[in-house]
Image: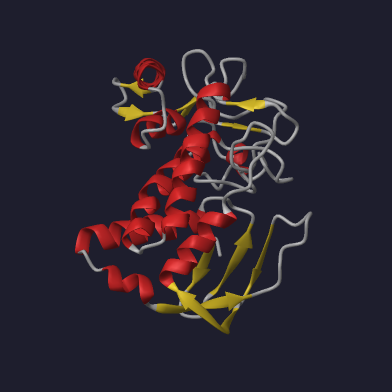
């Protein structure tokens, strides 16, 4: 579920690609902060609802509570394994939005990739490998470490635009967040997460953040832009972010 309304639980199911990865990251934070590994053995029921059709971006419905359950640990493992779907550059698929759900048309056909998601997935893999180790699951610990190492290499090989990291690829193969783009030539989130995740090459990450400071930090207005130039009149359709007033785009 991308989001839902309480108390009914009615909500929207989408192809958004980052939703399920917050569970293993939250589990890591909980266990490392409290030292309570027992929470990983708590059993939790699944929810049930119809699958999205291949050409369907989202649907709003009321899911039901399944009779099937599994431990929190296994929910996290399933979530991570579900994320290991990659495009032609070896980066994770963006689906109908990643952190920025207003970029819902970039990867709508589920064939293109999100550079931000690559940084985020790397971070989740590294962190959850620690949980797998604590849980005595050496096989999944090693899988997380191996996938993270491969992802870091793919980022290094393909996602550098010369002075900063790309943001994503459209389904038609066009870049997003490149110096070649008329709109959204640079986005802050990829640059920030190249540092936060530890997956970025140190020298490249430093250069990217210098470009963020040069191109996105507006000291006169006391704000940091999330991307520049704003989406407005280009032919590319990133999603409903383009229908917002130019300059009000959000990440």
Residue 217 found in image quarter: top left
Q: Name the spot of residue 127 as percent of width and height, x first.
A: 36, 49
> In this orientation, which residue lies closer to the viewer: 218 or 175?
175
Q: Is residue 56 above or below residue 74?
A: above
Q: Is residue 147 above or below residue 185?
A: below
Q: In the image, 229: left or right of 172?
A: left
Q: Name the spot of residue 12 as percent of width and height, x first.
A: 60, 65
Residue at (29, 73) in percent of width and height:
38
**Residue reaching furthest to the bottom:** 67
**Residue reaching furthest to the left:** 34
Q: In the image, 25: left or right of 177?
A: left
Q: In the image, 64: left or right of 189?
A: right
> In this orientation, which residue lies closer to the viewer: 128 or 197?
128
Residue at (54, 46) in percent of width and height:
98
Q: Name the spot of residue 69 as percent of width and height, x first.
A: 51, 80
Q: Name the spot of residue 14 as percent of width and height, x first.
A: 63, 58
Residue at (45, 49) in percent of width and height:
142
Q: Quadrant of the N terminus?
A: bottom right
């Amino acid at each position: 579920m991308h989001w839902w309304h309480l108390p009914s639980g009615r909500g929207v199911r989408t192809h958004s690609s980052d939703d399920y990865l917050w569970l293993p990251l939250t589990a890591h934070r909980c266990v490392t902060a409290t030292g309570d590994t027992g929470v990983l053995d708590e059993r939790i029921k699944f929810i049930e609802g119809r699958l999205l059709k291949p050409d369907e971006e989202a649907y709003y419905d009321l899911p039901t509570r399944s009779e099937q359950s599994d431990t929190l640990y296994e929910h996290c493992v399933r979530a991570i394994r579900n994320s290991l779907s990659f495009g032609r550059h070896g980066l994770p698929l963006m689906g109908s939005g990643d952190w920025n759900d207003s970029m819902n048309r970039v990867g709508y056909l589920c064939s293109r990739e999100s550079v931000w998601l690559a940084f985020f997935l790397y971070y989740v893999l590294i962190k959850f490998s620690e949980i797998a180790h604590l849980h005595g699951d050496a096989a999944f610990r090693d899988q997380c470490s191996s996938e993270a190492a491969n992802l870091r290499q793919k980022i290094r090989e393909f996602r550098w635009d010369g002075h900063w990291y790309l943001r994503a690829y459209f389904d038609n193969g066009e870049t997003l967040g490149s110096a070649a783009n008329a709109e959204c030539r640079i986005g802050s989130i990829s640059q920030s997460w190249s540092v936060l995740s530890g997956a970025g090459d140190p020298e490249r990450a430093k250069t990217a953040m210098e470009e963020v400071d040069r191109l996105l930090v507006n000291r006169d207005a006391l704000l940091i832009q999330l991307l520049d130039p704003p989406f407005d009149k280009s032919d590319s359709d990133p999603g409903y972010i383009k229908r917002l007033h130019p300059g009000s785009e959000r990440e």
